[in-house]
Image (cartoon, rainbow, N blue to C red):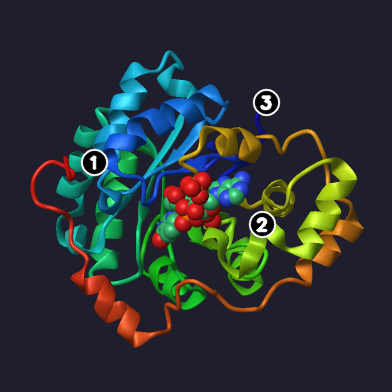
Amino acid sequence: MDQYVTLNNGVKMPIHGVGVYQIPDDVTEQNVLDALDAGYRLIDTAAIYLNEGAVGRALKRTSVPRDEIFVVTKLWVESYRDAKQAFSDCLERLQLDYVDLILLHMPYSAYHHAWADLEDVYKEGKARAIGVSNFLPHHMADLIAFSKVVPAVNQVECHAFSQRNDVMKYQKEYGITTMAWAPFAEGNNNMFKNETLLSIGKKYGKTAAQVALRYQMQRGVIVIPKSVHKERLVENRDVFDFSLTEEDMAAIAELDLGHPMLVNHMDTEFIKLIATFTLASGENGE
Ligand SMILES: NC(=O)c1ccc[n+]([C@@H]2O[C@H](COP(=O)([O-])OP(=O)(O)OC[C@H]3O[C@@H](n4cnc5c(N)ncnc54)[C@H](OP(=O)(O)O)[C@@H]3O)[C@@H](O)[C@H]2O)c1
């Protein structure tokens, strides 16, 4: 069972998937296979996660056909000046001849340059859709004003405590879909024990985690929870057999702090830190 969002270029993307951030390369291959077994059909990785190779091995091993799996990866900032090459490197590590969605990971460095390259990659059919991540409305306005293709997706920190209504409102004008990274706030703020989420979940026999995911999906937001535990992968997938009422939705809307909690893209020190993260030389950390 899956539900889809139709992107602004007509491509259908699952609204629910799995992320593999902070999963070591040697664990990722089995994690992706476990996720596919549990019914996940959207996998989110990135060049900087250094585990695209493992995702690629899992995609080779699975019996799920390639065209039933939606593969997302991201280019890292240091490669923006040669984004076509960086994109080819992603394809090679993933052992694929196309990805479903390629994102610019951060709104720093030569992102206009990289976007022009992704527009070409898109035209050549090597990516079914192109998008961005961590872009604030002013970054998006800058990109859209000076480009040909409007991003299909913006992947941002988005969870019950940081609901990103400002970002979503801006993106709606362009039909840009919001994809939530850290839908559990990486466990911060005690999300899994949050009283509102727990009490709503009790009505449906669901956990706080399941309610947190369902909330985003009912707002049209794509979720990609991560877990290295098979039973949690199953739990996080089991969100298609209940619906939150308007009242439930309103109660969860109240949890919003009104600002990002994990990463502040207005913080100049954070931008300096980003510049120090570089892709490992050699083969994807293997
Ligand atoms: N674009 C970006 O800049 C960006 C940044 C961050 C993340 N992402 C993407 O978004 C994905 C998800 O975000 P995230 O991994 O940072 O955080 P997350 O999904 O919000 O939270 C993951 C944490 O929650 C735990 N967890 C998962 N399911 C649980 C459950 N049912 N009950 C209790 N604990 C549970 C996991 O532990 P265990 O693993 O031990 O189960 C892990 O510690 C990433 O994997 C990545 O693909 C993108």
Secondary element under disc 3, as helix, strand or loop, is loop
Q: Earlier in the sequence, mark 2 or mark 1?
A: 1
Q: Residue at x 25, y 47 (%)?
A: 50
User: Is the shortest distance between ligand 1 and the CB of mark 2 under 8 Å?
Assistant: yes
Query: Disc count in the image?
Result: 3
Q: Which mark is residue 1?
A: 3
Q: Which residue is mark 2?
A: 192
The amino acid marked with disc number 1 is: Cys
- Relative to 41, is 278 on the left or the right? left
Q: Which residue lies under the disc numbered 1?
A: 90
Circle 1 SS class: helix
Q: Amino acid at mark 2?
A: Phe
Most foreground residue, 274 or 102: 274
Q: Is residue 101 above or below residue 35?
A: below
- Residue 39 coordinates in the image, percent (x, y): 57, 26
Q: CA distance from mark 3 to mark 2?
A: 25 Å
Q: Position of residue 144 (x, y in %)?
A: 43, 66
What is the distance, in whole Å, between disc 2 and disc 1 at their CAs?
34 Å
Q: Residue at x 79, y 64 (%)?
A: 195
Q: Disc 1 versus disc 3: distance between alpha carbons?
A: 29 Å
Chain-order first, disc 3 or disc 2: 3
Left or right placement of residue 102 versus residue 213 in this view: left
